[in-house]
Structures are given as C-alpha cells and as structure tokens.
Image (spheres, helix red, strand yellow):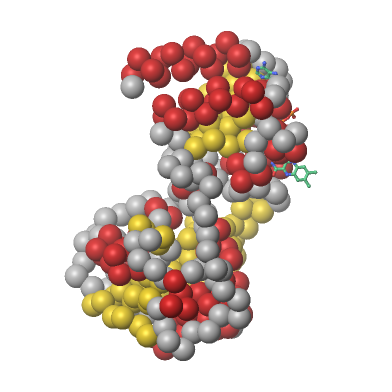
Amino acid sequence: MILVFAEQRDGVLKKASKEAVSEGKRLSSKLSVPVAALLMGKGADQAVDEVKKFGPDKVFVMEGASLDQYSADGFAEATANVAKEQGATVILFPATTMGVDVSPRVAARVEAGLVSDITGLDVADGKLVAIKPVYSGKALATVKFKSDIQMVTLRSNVFPLEENSSAPEVTKVDAAGISPKGMVVSTELKEGGKVELGEAAIIVSGGRGLKGPENFPLIEEVARLLGGAVGASRAAVDAGWIEHSHQVGQTGKVVSPVVYIACGISGAIQHIAGMGSSKFIIAINKDEDAPIFNIASLGIVGDLFKIIPALTEELKKLA
Ligand SMILES: Cc1cc2nc3c(=O)[nH]c(=O)nc-3n(C[C@H](O)[C@H](O)[C@H](O)COP(=O)(O)OP(=O)(O)OC[C@H]3O[C@@H](n4cnc5c(N)ncnc54)[C@H](O)[C@@H]3O)c2cc1C
C-alpha cells in the first residue's frame, strides 16, 4: 500500500496534501497497489470529502485528545502505527513544515529510507526513483532506495493536482494509545488571513534593494493585488525589515510558486536555492549584470521605486 500523510488544519486540507495524494494515485497505477490517505488531528473528519476528490482507495481518519494539538512525536507515532498495521511500502509526505518535522521520525520508526524535498518521482523495477535538487539546486540527484519501505517528502507546487473522484472506504483509527512525550498547549496564528509562503502560487519577494522596512508595503500591495504571498532575501531579514518566516533560500523556506517576482534581489546562490524551481521568475533589478537575470524568465532592468508603483497602478485597474 501507498500511504499519503494528508496534512489538514481545522478541517482544511493543505494544497500540498492534495498534490501528494494526486502523486500517490499516479504511483498506485504504476506500482499496482492501492493508495490510502491518512488524515490526522482536530478537524480530520471534516477533510474527508476534500481528500476523496483526489482518488484514494482508502482514507484513514485519526482523531483524539492526544492529537488535538500538533506534536511531532505524537503524529509520528500515529503515522508509523498506521503504516505498520497496513503494511505500507511507500509513504508520501508533503514537504510542508509539518511534513518535514514528522517524516524523519516516521522513517526511523518504520526503518524506511527517506528522500526529502523531491521534485520528481518515478518507478523502475518496482522501486521508486526520486529526483532531488542538491548543491543549492545546481544539480539534480537521482536517488534509488535500498530499504524495503520507501519514503519521500514532495516539494510544494511541483507535482500536478489531479482530481480523480473516488468512493474510498473510510476507516476511523483509534488514537487512544498515542502518548506524545511533549504536548503543545496552544498555538496562535500570527498573520491571520495572509497567504502562506510555502503554498502560494504567486510570491512577491523583496531584497536589500528595497532600502528599508518602510518600503515593504510596496511589495505587500502587489502581493495583495495578485493574491500572493510576500517573500524576502536574507539581507532584508537580517536587517530586521521583515520577519524570518518570510525568508526564501538555503536558510529560509524552499518555495516553488507558479510566479516568483524578485524585487531588488541580486540572486545569490543561497537565495536561488530556495526559489530556483519556480515556474516563471520575474526579476526587477537596476543592475543589468545581477545574477538573478541568469535564471529569470522575464528581466526588468530599472529602478524598482518606479516600476513597482507603475505595476501596482496597472494591477488596480484589473482588480
Ligand atoms: C550560509 C549562508 C546562508 C544563506 N542563506 C540565505 C537565504 O536563505 N536566503 C537569502 O536570500 N540569502 C541567504 N544568504 C545570503 C546571500 O548570500 C546574499 O547575501 C543575500 O541573498 C543577498 O540579499 P539581496 O539580494 O537582498 O541583497 P544584495 O545582494 O545586496 O542585492 C540587492 C540588489 O538590489 C538591487 N537594487 C538596489 N537598489 C535597487 C533599485 N532601486 N531598484 C532595483 N534594484 C535595486 C541591486 O542591484 C542588487 O542586485 C546566505 C548566505 C550564507 C553564507
């Protein structure tokens, strides 16, 4: 069986989970084994209808007091238990913050090989073959498994969504035996209503070229008009202009949106490591030799303080 950890929050299925279930479905035809989605934590039951749209043969729903608040070891124990009971040979996770936190703990518990943050997946001789960007995205490694159980985390916005309605068997799994070592007592959402960076289809990112925190509203407005999220280079984060949760790159988040707009960002290798797999990159930079132009699909050489307000005006006309 292929088991897909389908992350949900308060009954809302993450887009990255839909991508993972879609990929699980594609793999299930290649491997000729069924695919199951695992929903866990508070609200899991409400996410069943949504996950069904992506074609799982089975859905496991695990709710209970020990899973009401997220904990890495509680969720890992619960996932590992289901994987063992069902004899899962392939386990897919979305490479979300939660997926990255839980998956290695599951891998250790079920003695699986784990390839993280992959951008391609295929099957050869009945085993998975994963494509993983390495050296800050400069090369792609093709990774094969020696272990019997094979696990991967899938980079967001890379694997296509495929609706494939099914009528799966839905099974409630008892969470009573799960006893996490530590419990999160409560969580607070900091930026209610804003688009999450890792899931955004459009990201507008600002760098040192923005000159100061007072100019971030310029790109926030563009992001708002486009329904996107705001990213930043480390230079902007280190200068205290914006919080680290917005940082894109080697020591920030790895994103792969449909459109990435880099404003006043030079394109250092550590930044590209986090956004180089974006589908369409637009760079605005006054230096025509800036390395960001080497990977840009569309480059605009000029002063962002003139270009961004003009872009904002045009977007407002379309809104
Ligand atoms: C171990 C390590 C990890 C790192 N991790 C990360 C990471 O995760 N993410 C990350 O981003 N960086 C990371 N860095 C830092 C990285 O090397 C760069 O220093 C950083 O990305 C530079 O940010 P920047 O492009 O905003 O600034 P700069 O390199 O200073 O570039 C600013 C750009 O703005 C342009 N500009 C200036 N004014 C204007 C204007 N008016 N109009 C248009 N363009 C203008 C300039 O031409 C320039 O190209 C890391 C470095 C190390 C050593």
Looking at the rendering, the quadrant in which ligand 1 lies is top right
Residue, far left: 167
User: Quadrant location of the N terminus?
Assistant: bottom left
Query: Measuring 64% from the left and 20% from the top, which residue is drawn there?
Result: 285
Query: Measuring 57% from the left and 63% from the top, which residue is drawn there?
Result: 100
Question: Relative to 272, does residue 181 appear above or below in the rendering?
Answer: below
Q: Position of residue 273 (x, y in %)?
A: 65, 45
- The total of numbered circles placed on residues is 0
State the image quarter where residue 102 is shown. bottom right
Q: Foreground residue, 74 or 138?
A: 74
Left or right of residue 222, residue 166 in this image = left
Q: Position of residue 96 (x, y in %)?
A: 52, 57
Can residue 73 be seen in the rendering of this structure?
Answer: yes
Question: Relative to 101, does residue 59 appear above or below in the rendering?
Answer: below
Query: Measuring 66% from the left and 47% from the top, which residue is drawn there?
Result: 252
State the image quarter where residue 274 is shown. top right
Q: Foreground residue, 77 or 144?
A: 77
Q: Foreground residue, 46 or 81?
A: 46
Q: Position of residue 307 (x, y in %)?
A: 55, 14
Residue, far front: 185
Q: Foreground residue, 96 or 110?
A: 96
User: Quadrant location of the C terminus?
Assistant: top left
Question: Relative to 70, does residue 66 appear above or below in the rendering?
Answer: below
Question: Relative to 116, does residue 281 appear above or below in the rendering?
Answer: above
Q: Position of residue 294 (x, y in %)?
A: 64, 29
Query: Measuring 29% from the left and 75% from the top, which residue is drawn there?
Result: 58
Can residue 200 be seen in the rendering of this structure?
Answer: no
